[in-house]
Image (tube, helix red, strand yellow):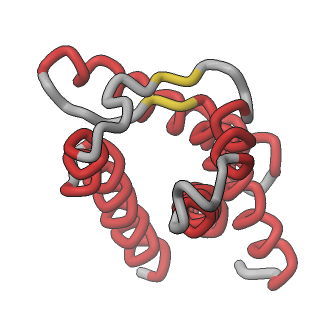
Amino acid sequence: MRRKILAAILLVYLCVVAALTVVPTHLSFIRIRNGNDSNHVNLIPLDYSFRCFRQDQGMHPHLTAFCLRNTLGNVALFMPLGILLPLVDTRFRSLKRVLILALCLSLTIETVQFALRFVGNPRAVDIDDVLLNTLGACLGFLIYRGLKLR
């Protein structure tokens, strides 16, 4: 019974992740309305993240908070995955397997975001998101291991 409840929680979590990452949000449209690049596609690892933090804070006073929220949000988004996977399925009791699944899931999300751009979805596509999501799942797995949840 416990495993079924955890599997249901994992399914709800994955639906929330899909809703947060694929469905256009009001923030996507605010970015466009404010004249920011609505065609943001970053394929250079950590390029956007580093540029975001190095911007002139005088010209963009809220930029540091945005960059921090974006970075930490991408890490936090996949932490539950790293905790829930090994609880639901014993095949995911190794960091390598969690890492591979998280990487594949995050790449799938970014690929869907890219494809949806052709039908008007203004979501940014960024390899940094893939790296940060995968890091988040790995940190979640380390929390699972550290707490010895089973």
Q: Residue at x 73, y 35 (%)?
A: 46
Name the foreground residue: 109 vs 66: 66
**Image-quadrant location for residue 143:** bottom right
x, y percentage for residue 85? 59, 59
Name which quarter of the figure residue 73 lies in: bottom right
Residue 114 vs 19, above or below: the answer is above
35 in relation to 31, above or below? above
At x 45% / y 29%, what residue is drawn? 125
Look at the picture and state if 81 lies above or below 51: below
Residue closer to the observer: 18 or 43:
43
In the rendered image, residue 116, in percent from the top left (x then y), is placed at 23, 24
> Residue at horizontal 81%, vertical 51%?
94
88 lies left or right of 146: left
Q: Is residue 143 above or below residue 20?
A: below
Which residue: 67% across, 56% down? 137
- The answer to whether residue 75 shows anywhere in this view is no
Is residue 31 visible to the viewer in this orientation of the structure? yes
